[in-house]
Amino acid sequence: MQPVRRLAILVAAAGLLAGCSRPESAVATGDRDQVLHLGNKDEPADLDPHINTASSTSTILSSLYQGLVTPASDGVTVLPGDAERWETSADGLTLTFHIRRDVRWSNGEALTAEDYRQSFLRILDPKLGCELSGYTFAIKGARDYIEGRQADPSLVGLRVPDPHTLVVVLDYPAPYLFKVLGRAPFYPVYLRALDTTGGRSQRGGAWTLPGVLVSNGPFTLAEWKPNAFIRVVRNPNYWDAGRVRLREIRFYPIDDEAAEERSFRAGQLHVTYRLPKTKVPVYESEHPGELHLTQSLRTNFVTFNVTRAPFTDPRVRRAFSLAIDRERLVGAALGKLGAPAHSFVRPGTGGYVPAGLFRFDPAEAASQLAAAGYPGGAGLPPVELTLNGNTGVALTVAEVLKEMWKTNLGVRVDVRAVEFKVYLSIERERQFQILTEGYSYISDPRDLLEGIVTGDPNNDAGASNPDIDRALDASDHALDPAGRWAAFDAMEAVNAREVYYAPIYFPNRGMLVGPSVKGWRDNSLGIIDWREISLGP
């Protein structure tokens, strides 16, 4: 065979083999191009940081925005953000933030202290209905402004003596404030875009879409394909852009943890949001370096709509809570991915250890239901349990609860599973009887307990109890931790008696992180400092 002909055959054979080879995985391509592929559970309802309450959406928002301060990846340390430094007065009532002179919006415009002031006033706007506006109550005049007792923004304790200085005046010291200032809802938003697309009181809207959204974080929004992925790209105008090594991040909404784990094994994801409980022992044994298990500051609970029968009666609510065997539920649905919840706040949160007042007592549960006029469940109106999604842990938990209520109370409960956006609407408009939900909170009990206070935007139960309201106020004005803990104990006790919310388990975050992901640090808050993440061998 002539050499030239042999070479031609070899080239053709090589081409044939190349054509039959498997395509490069998303992870392999991403490692080469610094593109992180990340599972993120839910399709976001919106990317407006002032109305977000979903932890999965918070992950996306943290790549697009930054606050005056920013939380470190240890979940504890507070780092400078847009403010290069700050001072606190001796009495703890005046915070002065000095904003960097090189801070820019993603469109290149300067970001000023007035942008922050106006953004904070938007959080306080009662027409917006920011669910996390309670974080601001320590700011002088904020609560009166939110609740409509006065409408003059100049009476709110936000001052701008010059373009690079923001002064925040408080009514009382707020030890939790720095834990939230670096997160939503305290990100600044580009209000000029809102002013031209529907006004500042609109909840989300066109200003949050690709090609329109202006942000100030390490990445900018490049593409959003609903129910497929959100793509963000490195922001060259970010003040610390030199430290950002990822070129892109792609967030994938995957509501089925089994499918997400398969995508990880197939090389389509660098990081998962969750994994099935049955896979935990497999990864512990075979791939321990990829398995990340962390306690989460989060409580998952049953919310009772106290404005709709039969849950207007606290005896019915108590019966449903007492009928829940939390240990058995965790064993059946979560394994190592959860712990039974006998209190509303997870013990140890910010140093606080609540009493475990929620218990399993089927005999007392049946007695409470009979006292309410429904012996053995007879005569009880139809009951519907609403949940987010119809796969994985959410569905398993719902089915276990349904079985316990049938066995221990004689009550039939129908399960209604809806997609995330519909769930949020049902929750916000209180169009449910009972629902399962969860809340991730900062390392301060106040964050979760505030949701029981009368009129709080996160009070999905519609609860109103003056003892709880007074206790929260007492916690805000307590002079030491012991005083705060006593106030929180009072709130836990009232909720255990009235059962507006029945805690069922504390999640443990179980996720998979590929070996090429560098700089990843686990923490109980799920915080990611994107400047620390890179991809490599």
Image (spheres, helix red, strand yellow):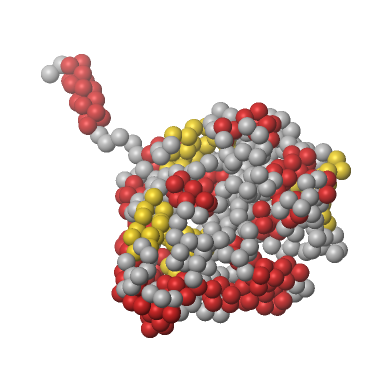
Q: Nearer the viewer, residue 210 or 428?
A: 428
Query: Which residue is located at x 40 percent, y 47 percent?
Result: 419
Q: How many marks?
A: 0
Residue that protrudes farthest toward the bottom in the picture: 363
Query: Which residue is located at x 34 percent, y 54 percent?
Result: 391
Is residue 458 visible in the rendered image? The answer is yes
Query: Which residue is located at x 49 percent, y 48 percent?
Result: 425
The percent coordinates of residue 63 (x first, y second) are: 57, 43
- In the image: residue 7, left or right of residue 162: left
Query: Which residue is located at x 77 percent, y 73 percent?
Result: 479
Residue 440: quarter of image: bottom right
- Quadrant of the image for the N terminus? top left
The percent coordinates of residue 107 (x first, y second) are: 65, 29
Residue that protrudes farthest toward the left in the picture: 1
Residue 23: quarter of image: top left
> Where 335 falls versus 101 (above or below)?
below
The percent coordinates of residue 503 (x first, y second) are: 48, 69
Q: Nearer the viewer, residue 274 or 13?
A: 274
The percent coordinates of residue 122 (x first, y second) are: 69, 43
> Where 389 falls versus 202 (above or below)?
below
